[in-house]
Image (spheres, rainbow, N blue to C red):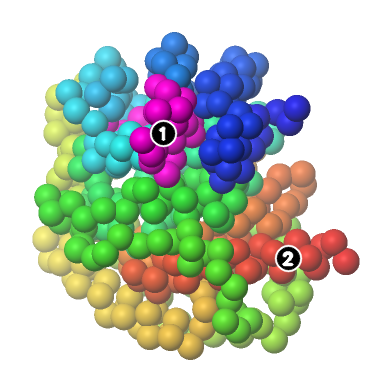
Amino acid sequence: MTDLSRLTATSALSQLASGDITSEQLVKACLDRIAEREPQVKAFAYLDPDGALAQARAADAARKSGKGVGPLNGLPVGVKDIIDTADQPTQNGCAYYKGRQPQRDATCVTLLREAGAVIIGKTVTTEMASTTPNETCNPHNLGHTPGGSSSGSAAGVADFMFPLALGTQTGGSVIRPASFCGIYALKPTFGLIPRGGVTMQSHTLDTVGVYGRSVEDLALITDALSAHEPEDPGSYPRSRPNLRATAMAKVPVKPLFAYVKTPTWHLVDKVAQEAFDELVAELGPLVQEIEMPSLENTVANHGIVQAAENAAYYGRLADVAGDAISAGLRTRLEAGRKVTGEAYIKAVNTRETASREVDMMLASYSAILTPASTGPAPKTLASTGNPIFNSPWTFLGQPCVNLPLMEADGLPIGVQLIGARRDDGRLLRTAQWLGQHVAGSSAM
């Protein structure tokens, strides 16, 4: 029998629906993998095997009842440890919050449970989802970072501990770990997935994102999570999308990609540049290199907004937490307090103009094509890498996908596709085409 822990979510779902496997068998296979690898990878902040098996048995019972089940029924999902869960602690990767037990689930966790998912455990985050790493290692090479801040979610999917996971991105915290760990990821349009019950860093930047083992996996879980939450200032009313159907539909014409060398292109590792140049050459006339002057200051403006809003949301930790926060976090919070109101407003006011320009450009292109990271995962656990190729798109609220299409020195490197706001389905469809195209070219 195939090792069930290695199934994609969509394949597992099909076998669950047909009765070929049970959720209890799937979850047990994942728990066996966790028992084998967790001492090395350290993806979990909290794990309750008995609770996960109980959820799996309940999912199996619901399926047998014949009353209908949710779209994720019986699938294990890892949840980043800044997302509230009523039955498991949420400690923000921070000693100050050790033992914190929320009274209710975050909205996205409620949606997962309504869809029938099994919350297998809480995954490691960097401290307060900021830059100070915790202990998670890259499963491809334990001496290398898995990226951050969604470290445990990305590493766990990559190491076959669970097929799906939630992360969050304020700078590059979904896409960069996916690049380093060699998995699929979606940072959706800002506001697509509700944020109630998620520890807030930045109300204008924070985005809940997802991990999986295929583009279809990403669409499957995002469909279950898409909802309007009036209490969330970033959420917007709309009909529920059917991203899975759109993502798996045949493209009407071959995609045309805009190849954008952002102002930080010089920071790309040589091996990553060579791999990316090979991809661009393979795509040939389907890629056009373009200039986007509006991106010139997005990295700096993103940094101003993130610093100021971080300080506003939990700057008090610098006053009350003492040694329960790291020196690095304290320094970031103190720097955020020094951002002037004038600088903050000027930075915020650049966003809409630049994002409109990107959306207008994407009327002529299927997606923007860029590296997902500056190169393969650095050989260190003291840093989570540079988010410089992610933060501009987070600042603008654009949806982004990571595809694990390249590698160098035995480590994966992701390809990042960026789409127009609120057009996540088209972006996923383009990503599916690109993945199939590259796979077909490699097989020839």
Quarter of the rendering containing residue 66: top left
- Tell me the residue that label 2 is attached to: 438
- Counting from the top left corner in percent of width and height, residue 431 is at 57, 65
Q: Earlier in the sequence, mark 2 or mark 1?
A: 1
| Residue type, label 1 | Gly
Q: Secondary structure at mark 2?
A: helix
- Counting from the top left corner in percent of width and height, residue 114 is at 31, 37
- Tell me the residue that label 1 is attached to: 66
Confirm whether residue 159 shows in the render. no
- Counting from the top left corner in percent of width and height, residue 262 is at 50, 72
Marks 2 and 1 sit apart, C-alpha to C-alpha, by 41 Å
Task: Tell me the tag on residue 38.
Answer: none
Label total for image:
2
Q: Is residue 325 magenta?
A: no
Residue drawn at 50 percent across, 45 percent down:
211
| Residue type, label 2 | Val
Q: Please report the bounds of the magenta region as a residue range.
A: 58-84
Quarter of the rendering containing residue 45: top left
Q: Is 319 on the left-hand or right-hand side of 242?
A: left
Residue drawn at 38 percent across, 85 percent down:
360
In this rendered view, identify the residue nearer to me: 69 or 125: 69
Q: Residues within 10 Å of mark 1 (few under 14, many from 20)?
A: few
In this rendered view, identify the residue nearer to me: 127 or 38: 38
